[in-house]
Amino acid sequence: LSEAKSQPRRFLQFAMKIPRGAPHEYMVNLLWGIRQAEEADGASKATLPTETEARELVIHLGYREETFLGTEICRFMLDRSSTFYNEPIRKLISRYATEHPDSGGRIHRKQDEEKAFHIQVDALNSTRGIALTVIAHILFELKFLPEDIILVLDKTACDTSPAIRLATVRTCLPILNFDPTTASDLFLRACEGQDLMLASPHVSEFLQYALPSRPELFALPRRMAYSTLPEVVRIGASWIAAYWIGREGDDTLLRSLMKTNKACRTGIALAAAQN
């Protein structure tokens, strides 16, 4: 590992010669060392892989179902320049996002609070979740929605894994910049029937930017306010109150929520205090 970190370009070239049948743990360690070198402050550019070399290594490795290797390949593709993501790379990332067996699955615990936490962990750290994070980065760079990525997100928004749906929510924010209608539709589909993930900061972040101009999204906070999960109720009620404060109109819903339960009242009070 220390050698790979000190001479990342040399070890990348070495990695290109490793056959696919070799123990995958070796490649995991090499990729980790190369990433650490790239992220280090003050690294010499002469020792770092070029964009072309990094792309060639990813293509050489291809699609791998071993969990740790798939995760490391996807992490290796994060935070590259827009020119890195050519068509073969996008196809590979799309496959990792939709087909890889690692979508987390750490939500067997009994308590809803623990389940909600692990959904968020899996959205950030599973192979498929990281692949969707790469897609979000691509969309921030491209500022348009390619047809191949639309097909991927249409699948992941309806995935059986709540963690993958939450990872899809994270891709909605860059889409909001150039196609707010598609972003809102994708967001609502990803959130459908998934109360455990609605307390995530990623859901609130999207609502923060989109709700003022997309009134159709108001249906989600309304649904959240009647959830069986107190934290989801609190956040939903807070969004309803924040949306209503400063606007003239019917406040029947807000008044009725104030009479329901402690979570609703807490959410409304927090919104009132912040506005």
Image: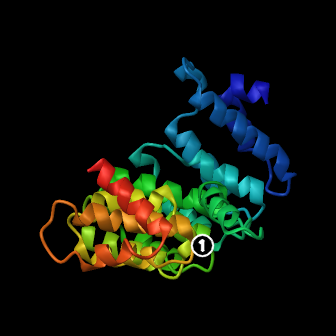
Residue for point 71% across, 39% down: 32
Label 1 amino acid?
Pro
Relative image position of residue 131 (x, y in whole percent): 57, 59
In this image, 53 relative to 257: left or right?
Answer: right
Please determine whether, in this image, residue 167 is positioned above or below residue 57.
Answer: below
In this image, 239 relative to 59: left or right?
Answer: left
Q: Which of the 4 quarters of the picture holds residue 268?
A: bottom left
User: Circle 1 — which element?
Assistant: helix
Q: Is residue 97 visible?
A: yes
Relative image position of residue 98 (x, y in whole percent): 59, 72
Instruction: Please give the count of numbered marks on the rendered protein.
Output: 1
Residue for point 57% across, 30% down: 39
Residue for point 36% across, 52% down: 140
In this image, 16 relative to 271: left or right?
Answer: right
Camera-side residue of 127 and 203: 203
Give the class, few, some or many, for how many residues have Cα within 10 Å of label 1's Cα (few <14, many ≥20): many
Q: Residue lying at the far left in this picture: please name it.
A: 248
Please determine whether, in this image, residue 82 is positioned above or below residue 47.
Answer: below
Q: Is residue 172 visible?
A: no
Residue placed under numbered mark 1 in the picture:
162
Q: Residue lying at the far front in this picture: please name it.
A: 259
